Image (tube, rainbow, N blue to C red):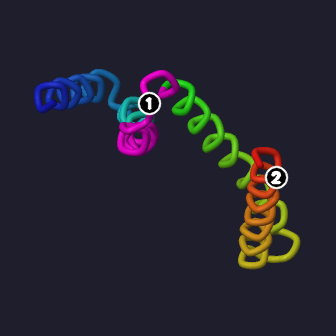
Amino acid sequence: MMADSVEHVISYRVMFEKFHSPALGGFAVISHWLPFLFFSGYSGALADRFDHAPAQIRGRVIGLYSMASLGLRAFAGVTVGLLGTMIGIHWSLALSALALFAITAGLLSFITRTTS
């Protein structure tokens, strides 16, 4: 890991010396490390959470969890952003949490009703 980091630092320095543009150097750093920082949390959570899942369904469970978490993030951004401009950010977060709780409770009752 250290050699990889040093290699990137050298290439960023060479790029800065060639073009004399801090913005280009900043873009290079952000475009290289931002995906790593964004996906490392998900990868760590997935590895920790689904290590004990049966091998037959592990890939399906990880795919479902990833799609659901990323999809809910986009939905939460829209609801909190739109509601936040209309009624305020605190009430928007409270209503979004209440909606998530209601949907989760509804799905849980549906699952328990159909499996019984």
Q: Main secondary structure of the magenta part?
A: helix
Residue 59 screen position, x and y as percent:
50, 24
Q: Which residue is mark 2?
A: 113
Quarter of the image for residue 94 reads bottom right
Considering the image in quadrants, where does the N terminus appear?
A: top left
The residue type indicated by label 2 comes to Arg
Q: Secondary structure at mark 2?
A: helix
Q: Residue farthest to the front?
A: 116
Residue furthest toward the left? 3
Q: Give residue 31's position: percent from left, percent from top.
A: 43, 31
Which of discs 1 and 2 lies nearer the camera? The answer is: 2
Q: Secondary structure at mark 1?
A: loop
Residue 22 visible to the viewer: no
Dot 2: within a 10 Å radius of its alpha carbon, few (fewer than 14), some, or many (20 or more) residues?
Answer: few
> Can you tell which quarter of the image residue 33 is in?
top left
Residue 111 drawn above or below residue 40: below
* Mark 1 or mark 2, earlier in chain: 1
Of 89 and 14, nearer the camera is 89
Q: Amino acid at mark 1?
A: Pro
Please rate how many residues cluster around mark 1, counting C-alpha atoms within 10 Å: few if below 14, some from 14 to 19, many from 20: few
Taking the magenta stretch, the answer to whether it contains residue 34 is no
Drawn side of residue 92 relative to residue 41, left or right: right
Location of mark 1 (residue)? 54
Residue at figure coordinates x 38%, y 35% from the top left: 36
Residue shown at 84% from the left, 66% from the top? 83
Q: Which mark is residue 32?
A: none
In depth, the one of 67 and 9 nearer the eye is 67
In the displayed structure, 8 sits above or below 116; it is above
Magenta segment boundaries in residue numbering: 37-58
Please, is residue 113 above or below residue 24 in the view?
below
Image x and y of residue 5, in percent: 19, 31
* Residues at marks 1 and 2, CA–CA distance in whole angstroms: 25 Å
